[in-house]
Structure formats: structure tokens, C-alpha cells
Amino acid sequence: MFSLLFPWSSSIATGNARYVHRCGCAAESASDVASSCPEDLAARIAGILPNARLKKSLETRKLRRSVGIDYGLERTGIAVTFCGLAPRPLSVSKLKGDNLIKKLLSVAKKEKADEFIVGLPRSWDAQETEQSNKTRTFAGRLAQYSAEEGVRVFLHDEYMTSEDALEFMIYRGSTKKSRRLEVDAYAAVIILQTYFHNDGRFAQLMVPKRGELQETLCSKYYQRLSQIEEDEDEDEDNEEL
């Protein structure tokens, strides 16, 4: 029944994707996740996909928005998009810790988003840095809170997004003041653009540590997919009539 309802899940469950488990500890395959999860739960976690991949399997208009996050120790840029279409900067927040997480959950609710895409910084030679570790820790904590709301958290590699964002703002004629104040939000836009351009292939799911939160995340995710499938079946029936 699992593979029939979600035909894309079989390739994911074999370990073709990379997962992040237990608030930042990288797991190379779904089998690593299974070592600390009940078998059925591990399979359900392995089947959770980002919207960038779901849009190839489901009717696009049924999906929800994605919120991009350019996390920083002093400033965090926030952007939003619907299935990769016209991503737009939302704001730059100076909040930290739990206050920042509350802010992001509020944004997700207002924008009707069901996933966060957090940029994972890397060095010029694709190596992780001290900031990468801090970002992983933040994303792991965000995943714990957002699971209760059914909002998934994915990490997606980023490199020079701030530089690209600044170049784009200069190109569109932004003032020096707006570039200084808004560059982090435009960096979040670029994170979303890169994520959708790559069809979410490199997105890493952050799995909350607590088993009950894992159950909640899975339950809300698959309930949403079931509702989409039911809506699509209903639309097809109406078209036949």
C-alpha cells in the first residue's frame, strides 16, 4: 500500500538521498536513520520529499509555499515562493534563538507554507565551516518546533549567495541603503532559486530527535498527500461529468 500510494518512495528508502538525523547528525542513508527509528517509522521518514520534487508528481496548484532562510548569527534573511515561481524577499530579522524560530513559524502560517529551506554555507572548496555547524544546530532546533505544525525543514547547500544577491540588487538599481538592509533576504531568494533549479535533489531533511515529533511530522505530511490525491481524483471525476 505504501509504494502504491507514493510510488516515488521506493528509490528514497534505498538510500539514494542523504538525510540529516537527530538535530544535525548526518546520516548517509535511510538505513542509518532506521538504526534509531522503528522500521515502519524509518520508512515513512525516508519517503518525505521536498516540494521541489513533489511538484513533478502532483498537481502544482495543490502544493503549498516554501520559505527560504539565509541564517546568520546577527541577521537572518527570509524569502518565499510557490513552487519556485517568482520567489520574493520577505524580511530580514535580527531575532535570535527561540524568538527567531517563533518568527519563522509565524511566517510559515501566514504564507501557508509547509517547508523551510535553510541555506547551508560552505567554503569555496565545498567544505563545511564553523558557520555550517551553527546552521545545522539552528536547523535541527527549528525542526523540533516546526514538526508539531507539520512544517518540514530541509538544508540546501549554498555558496556565495550574499555576493550573488548583492550583484542582483545592483543590477536592478537598488540603493546602497536597501542593499545594506535587504541583501540577506535576497540571499534567501537565491537559496530558493537554487533549490528549485536542482529539483530538490540535494535537499537534506532535518529529522527531530523525539520519536513523537517524528510521528507527528510523518502523520501531517502523509495526510496532506492523501488529501491532494483525493482532490485530484475528485477533479478528474468532475471533468468526466
Image (tube, helix red, strand yellow):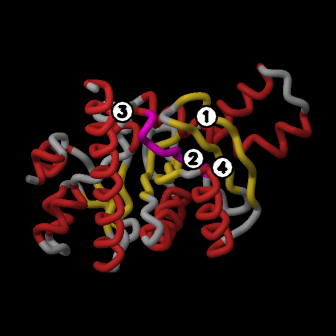
The stretch drawn in magenta includes residue 36: no
Q: Earlier in the sequence, mark 3 or mark 1?
A: 3
CA–CA distance between discs 3 and 2?
22 Å
Specify the label residue 59 is tagged with.
3
Q: Main secondary structure of the magenta part?
A: strand
Front residue of this view, candidates 59 and 176: 59
Mark 2: which secondary structure? strand
Amino acid on which disc 3 is placed: Glu
Is residue 68 rendered magenta in the image?
Answer: yes
Mark earlier in primary sequence (4, 1) = 4
Residue 87 x %, y %:
61, 34
Q: Which residues are magenta?
A: 61-70
Q: Residue furthest top?
A: 171
Q: Residues within 10 Å of mark 4 (few under 14, many from 20)?
A: many
From mark 4 to mark 1, how far is it between C-alphas?
Answer: 11 Å
71 shown above or below 159: below
Q: Amino acid at mark 1?
A: Pro
Could you tell me which residue is drawn at 13 percent across and 60 percent down? Answer: 31
Q: Is residue 138 left or right of residue 225?
A: right
Residue 192, given in percent of the width and then of the height, sits at 53, 38
Q: Which residue is mark 2?
A: 68
The quarter of the picture where the C terminus appears is top left
Q: Which residue is mark 4?
A: 78
Q: Residue at x 39, y 66 (%)?
A: 24
**Is 52 placed left or right of 185 in the picture?**
left
Packing grade of label 2 (10 A; few <14, some 14-19, many >=20) is many
Q: Which mark is residue 87?
A: 1
